[in-house]
Each structure stands twice: as structure tokens, then as C-alpha cells.
Image (cartoon, rainbow, N blue to C red):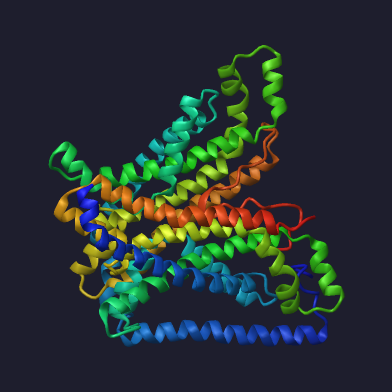
Amino acid sequence: MNLSVLFDTPGPRGRVRNHLLTAVSVLVVGGIAYWVYLGFDAKGQFEGKIWEPFLDPYTWQTWILPGLAGTLRAAALAAVLALAFGAIFGLARLSDHAWIRIPAGLVVEVFRAIPLLLLIFFIFYLAPTVMGGGDYAFMAVVLGLTLYNGSVLAEVVRAGVLSVPKGQAEAAYAVGMRKNQVMRLVLLPQAVTAMMPAIVSQLVVLLKDTALGYIIAYVDLLNTGFKILPAVFFGSLIPAAIVIGIIYVGLNMALSYLAHWLERRSRRSRKTAAPPVAPPGAEAIGLRSGGGLDSTD
Amino acid sequence: MDELIKYAPVLAEGFLENVKLSLVAAVASLILGTILVGMRVSPTPVLRAAATVYVNVVRNTPLTLVLAFSALGLSDQLGLVFSQEPSVNSFWIVAMGLSFYTASFVCEALRAGINTVPLGQAEAARSIGLSFFQSLRLIILPQAFRAVIAPLGSVMIAMIKNTTVATAGGYLADAAATMKEVFDTTGASIPIFIGIVIAFMALTMPIGYFTGWLSRRLAVAR
């Protein structure tokens, strides 16, 4: 049984060596885990007292769930706005008119290059001067996420439309369709299928980035779970980090799994002539050519 | 405009901290990411599983949580201290958190790169008797690196932008924290914001172009 082409199916000596390596690595990984455990234990992080709050429904109702709601509210609104922003600017960048194409391209490139936290800070401080006093944390987070992720999604939309084979548009023009009919009836429906995985991956990034709201004191999961909760239940900082970490990782992994599933589906889809668009930004790795040395995928 | 000129030295000092953080995190995350990808394709199931769990957990955790946990949890509660000087200590705490976070993205990029290396390369390496470690080091990784120079550039650009989150790890000397402090006295100032953004773009855009150029130049001809 060969799992990977990177190494041979081991013979008798190889098997012994692999078992030895496995044993050693179990010891090393287990050793690190035990060392962390000892460190936590020495500081009393496994005392029932500091974990108790997390078994109490009151804790969840008062802090964790409202925080989660804050995170999801910001993420949902920002996702909708970013999708709209991305669709508009992505299509604007494909326009035949230079006076639309160039400004749209400039906006997309600039907002993609600005560190998101700086953008959020700027909006947070600018809003009161423009619109008078009030709490603009929510607005700053949503607007910042929209502008940044919208710009990334605009690139996805553009790549999606461009990934539809040229023959499709040519055929559509040949049967007498107008420019907007070609886009609306032929290119976009095919592009959307190809774009779906990349869009969902970007939504994972968006959901993760809502945590930046913590820095401007927006009431999100990180804020209620990691700042307020440990302040109420003294000493429960590490348990709090572990609990909200699990919530974040669970949410994001569910979304990532959805993206993966969509990608597999669109890869074998016959509704589109376009290959799936690579996820943008940090995850911009669309290099899945023939090869396939890695068995774990 | 006057505000920008008045506060430029302070802001430049803050920005320099971002550059320093980027340099440390770039080196550390590339090394750690390479080790992780080696583990992920290794013949030892335990190492494979450990690296997979690490990458999936860290990649799906918000950086803000990673840094806040590094500072409040690891450093304050569990006593991980790099230096007695608080500001030096939090610099290294943030650099560590950022490196651990970025390493998971480097690992994913490299894994995609390994996927682009044709089967025949690995088979040929095995057939001339190279061991797993030798074929990884001499045949697979060099080709994988060349295939993912541009994506690695994107990872590094994202990492540079992420240095602004240092505030969450209690390091209050970087450009974002400095800008916030200046805004506290001046109110939102558009020239200051644009100035810092341009500084960041001056850092990230050449990396984008350079890695793009390098990846075309070093592309493996097949």
C-alpha cells in the first residue's frame, strides 16, 4: 500500500525504520503536548474552577452568544456589501470604456493594497468628524471589510469572466446578442460557477478579519469572549481562548469545506466551459496541474 | 499636509517597526513553513497528522486571536518571556505569533507547489536510490519553490500588511498604533493616512513585481 510517490513502499528494513520514526515522532509530538500540559498545569489552568463558567448556560447567553451574533452580523452584512462591490467593480474593470475601466481599476488596486486594520482605524476616526458623535465601530468594521474584500472579489469576478473561453462570447455575438446580453446570458452564468469556490474562500478571510473589530472595541466574539469574559471570571483567560478558538476554527473550517466541495463540483460541472478560478490573495495558489505528488489532498 | 510633516518622524519610526517585524516573520515563517510541508508529505503518519492539524487550526484562527493569545495567554499567564524589557518582549511575542500564523500559509503554498512537480520526477529520484529526505531536498522542493514564487510573494505581502495587527499582541510601537495615537490628538487626518498607505505600498508593490518577475524567470520549463 503506497500512500505517496515520494517514497517507496517500504521493505522489511524500511518498515522497521518507519516504525522507529513513528515511535520517535510520537514521543516528540507527545513530549511537546505534555510539556504544554505541564506548563498549563503548573499555572493551574486545569482547575475546574476556571473552566466552570463555560458549562453554565448563563455565560453563553450573556457573553459568548451575543459576541458570536456581533461577529456574524458584521460578517454577513460585509459579505453582502462586498459581493455587490466586487460585482460592480469587477465588471467595471472589464468595461470597453476607458473612463470606467481605469478609475475602477485604480480603486480596486488601492483598496487591495491598504492594510485592512489601517483602513478600519481611518474610517473609525473619520466617521465622527463627518457625521457627528456616535459609535461607529460596527460601521468601521463593515465598511473596512467591504472595501478590502470587495476589491479582492472584484478581481475574482474579473478572472471568472476572463476564464470563460473566448469562443463563448464570439458565438454569442455571432447569433446577434448585444454586449449586455452576452455578459448577462452567456458569460456571467458560466463565470459564477467557476468563481464560487474562490468567493467562498474569500468569505472565510472576511469572517476571520471581523476579529479586527476587537482592536477598535467592536462587540464581537473575540471581544466578549477574550476581553470581557476573563475580566468577569478571573483567571479563565486560557479556557476562554480555547473555547472561542474552537468556535472560530469550526466556523471557518465549515466554510472552507464548503469551498472545497464547490470546487470539486464546479470542476466536473458541465454548466460551464471555464475552469475554477484560483482563490485570491494569500491563498492565491491555483497551480493544480497534472502532477499530484501529494497524497494527502 | 502640515500634520503629516509634523508627525512624519514619529510615524516613520512606527513604520520601521513594521519593517523589522516583517523581516523577522519572513525568515521565520519560510523556515517553519518548509519544515511543516516536509512533515505533511513525510512517510511518518504521526508527523503528517500533526502538521495537518497545525495548519488547519492556525490557518482558520483570526490573527487577532493568535496575537492576543500569544501576548495575554502565553506571555502574561504562562510566563513565556523573551526579554525583561516589556517593549522588546512584546516585539518578539508578536514576531513569534505572526511567524506561526504565516508559516501555515507558507506550508499550504509549498504543498500546492509540490503538487505541480510531475510524478516522473519523484519516481526517477526514487529509482536512482535517493531516500525520501534526499529526493525532497534535491529534487522536489527546489522545483516546488520555483513553481510557487508568486504565491509566496502574495503570502509575504499579506504578512507585511498583517504586521499592523501587532497592536492586538500588545506591541504599541508600530505604524497602526502610532497612527491611532496621532489621530487621538489630531482627529482623522487624510494626509497622514495616505502617507502611511503609500509607505506600505512602497514596501509591498516591489515585492509583488519582483516575485512576479522572478517566477517568470525561474519558471520550470516543461
A267 vs A170, nearest the viewer: A170
Visible residue check, residue A69: no
Give coordinates of residue B201: x percent, y percent: 42, 52
A50 vs A258, nearest the viewer: A258
Classify residue A130 as left or right of residue B45: left
Residue at x-position 20% and y-position 49%: B2
* Quadrant location, the N terminus of chain A: bottom right
> Could you say which quadrant of the image residue A171 lies in?
top right
> Could you say which quadrant of the image residue B23 lies in?
bottom left
Give coordinates of residue B57: x percent, y percent: 48, 65
Give coordinates of residue B108: x percent, y percent: 58, 62
* Quadrant location, the C terminus of chain A: bottom right
B185 vs A289, nearest the viewer: B185
Residue A116 position (above or below residue B160): above
Residue furthest to the top: A176
Residue A197 position (above or below residue B172): above
Classify residue A84 as left or right of residue A236: right
Residue furthest to the left: A133
Residue B50 position (above or below residue B211): below
Residue at x-position 74% and y-position 74%: B138
Classify residue A69 as left or right of residue A16: left
